[in-house]
Image (cartoon, helix red, strand yellow):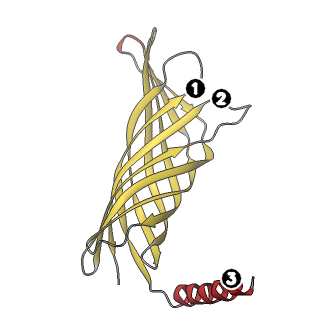
Amino acid sequence: MKKIIIPMLLLTTVCLAQCLSAPISTRVGLKAGINPGTYDPNDDLDAMKGTGVHFGIGMGTDFLNLIALDIGAQFRTTKYSRDEPLGRITHSYNNLYFPIFLSLKAAMLPLISPYIGAGLGINVQFEGVRRWEPNGVAVETELEGATNAYFILGLGAEIKFTKLRICPEFTANIKPTSDDQNDKYTDYHLSVGLYYAP
């Protein structure tokens, strides 16, 4: 038993020393893109679909060039529409979105590091507009806003230059549902980040 414990302790000590002395790098910049999405109110009709835009700031920290933690603040628009028997319905919202994303990078490549990750996003949805267009006449009413949490799954790549990082990224932002809440939101972010890495 001692023959196993001593090598394990030595290995653990070496690993901890490497982690504590590991290089840590940071970056800060801008991110922008489009967000196609769906909203299913679970009313036995087709889901509503549409595309919005998002842009904002972001910052990240890399540990060992293998694990990265990114946080950001984005303004984004969401728009969902569908055709119904009496006319076209559109729901439009303005939102503030705060994603926290933890990723695992393949840092063995010198210029491009692909990554996958998961995270949590807090979406502050302001009052929206419901637009109903029967026979070419538009009728608008206000929609209540809400604050929701989204589960984030994503992948991307970091293209590295001397002080610049370009990060094309795809994420799926899924709103969890509960027993008393049957409507479903899913938004897909296609974005590009431009970061300064000091």
Q: Are marks 1 and 2 in contact (CB under 8 Å)?
A: yes
Q: CA gap, disc 3 to disc 2?
A: 53 Å
Residue beneath the point at 41% across and 20% down: 138
Q: Secondary structure at mark 2?
A: loop
Separation of residues labelled 1 and 2 (CA atoms): 7 Å
Residue 172 in the figure: left or right of residue 122: left
Residue with the mark numbered 3: 4
Quarter holding residue 133: top left
Quarter the C terminus occupies: bottom left
The numbered mark, 1 or 3, whose residue comes first in the sequence reads: 3
Q: In the figure, residue 62 lies in which quadrant? A: bottom left
**Quadrant of the rendered structure where residue 27 is?**
bottom left
Dot placed on the residue nearer the N-terminal end, 3 or 2: 3
Question: Please, is residue 89 above or below residue 108 in the view?
Answer: above
Name the residue rendered at 59%, 23% in the picture: 42
Placement of 119 over or under 81, stated as above or below: below
Residue 156 or residue 40, whichever sits in front:
156
Residue displayed at 61% across by 30% down: 183
Q: Tell me how far mark 1 sits from mark 3, CA to CA.
A: 58 Å
Q: From the viewer's perspective, is the residue at label 3 or at label 2 nearer?
A: 3
- Residue 151: percent from left, percent from top: 57, 49
**x, y percent for residue 92:** 46, 35
Crowd tier of the residue under label 1, counting other residues whose Cα lies within 10 Å: few below 14, some 14–19, many 20 or above:
some
Classify mark 3: residues with Cα within 10 Å, few (<14), some (14-19) or many (20+): few
Place of residue 185 in the rendered image (x, y in percent of width and height, measured from the top left): 54, 36
Residue 41 disc label: 1
Q: How many marks?
A: 3
Residue position marked by numbered label 2 in the rendering:
182
SS of the residue at dot 3?
helix
Q: Residue at x 52, y 58 (%)?
A: 99
Residue type at the position of mark 2:
Asn
